[in-house]
Amino acid sequence: MNIYICAEIDDHHVKEIMDSHKEFKMIYKEELTQEDVNNANLIIGNPNMNLDLHSDSLKAIFLNSAGNNQFLNGDYINKNTRLTNASGSYGPVISEHVLGMIIAMNKNFKYYINNHWHQLYTGKELYKSTVLIVGLGDIGLSFAKRVKAFDTHVIGLRKHPSKSPYVDIEDTIDHLDQYLPLADFVLLALPETKETIHLFNEERFSLMKQDSVIANVGRGSAIDEKALIKHIKSHHLFGACLDVCESEPLPDTSPLWDMEQVLITPHVSGGYHWESVQSYYTALVIRNIDHLLKDEPLENEVDLNLGYRTHVIRREE
């Protein structure tokens, strides 16, 4: 089996993958050519989008991104090629990032950084607040674990509810409108699907609790930014923490840049350079090579029609 590794992982992780299956030819290249794709039986990482991935010999692609929607647009890959994403790799680093943004928002850090000695007597507390997590996958569950340390009441919504640790109430996303008026903080950790685009629109922002905070680390398309801007300007919302936006990079002309109660980071919460991300992804790849050889279900395998994972292994933390 010819295996090409294009994931941006450190040398010791590349070696770990290669040493796990020395019987196969493995080649590491930062950029794959069309000839490489044509010769590959397995690609580890995200191949360049300008390559033709319809090769009949390409058995699987193990993406190093948690998102996979860019590979589902149209007839982009061979229907017989199995696709997995790296969900599970990013939960701890993204939840740390968004928790930092929320605390900075609550405690007016943005104001204090940009001003001299001037005390504000406004803000918010996470302590004993109600937190609504919309999208209770790896990122949502990792965040639930950490935010629970603030004695919060955590509500989690997902497509198929189960009894998750650190979550007080778990329900389906169909009941989103029921919980929005209760939440002091709302975290979006959703993939992009037909159902999630502009899930948060004028109507949903109107349902949100007065003086609440919304944070988005999933996909920018989940928020109608015009509606968000309106509800921040009217002071219905206390603020927004955005690591993802509808258009990336966010245009310089966007009013969001000038709003004191908006924190923006440039889609960096799940940076691939973190050791925890690379370590988890490396172990996932090695397990999935074994699954592929045994013709078993792959961990994080993506249904090419549904656009999301159908075989999930929970991260052990």
Image (cartoon, rainbow, N blue to C red):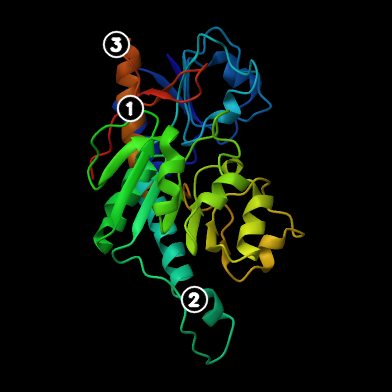
Label 1 residue SS: loop
Q: Residue at x 44, y 63 (%)?
A: 102
**Label 1 environment density (alpha carbons within 10 Å; few <14, some 14–19, many ≥20):** some
In space, the residues marked 3 and 2 are separated at their CA atoms by 54 Å
- Label 3 belongs to which residue? 294
Element assignment for label 3: loop
Q: Secondary structure at mark 2?
A: loop
Query: Can you say which quadrant of the picture contains the C terminus?
Result: top left
Q: Which mark is residue 30?
A: none
Q: Nearer the viewer, mark 3 or mark 2?
A: 2
Left or right: residue 85 versus residue 154 is right
Q: Amino acid at mark 1?
A: Val
**Viewer-proximal residue, 201 or 141?**
201
Mark in the foreground, 1 or 3 = 1
Q: Amino acid at mark 3?
A: Lys
Farthest right residue? Answer: 253
| Residue 142 placement (x, y as % from top left) | 32, 47
> Which residue carries the number 2 mark?
108
Q: Is residue 94 among the parts visible in the rendering?
A: yes
Identify residue for label 1. Answer: 312
Disc 3: CA contacts within 10 A as few (<14), some (14-19) or many (>=20): few
Can you tell which of label 1 and label 2 is closer to the viewer? Answer: 2
Residue 205 locus on image (x, y percent): 56, 51
Identify the residue shown where x is 63% and y is 23%.
Answer: 73
Relative to 300, is 116 on the left or the right?
right
Residue 74 or 25: which is nearer the viewer? 74
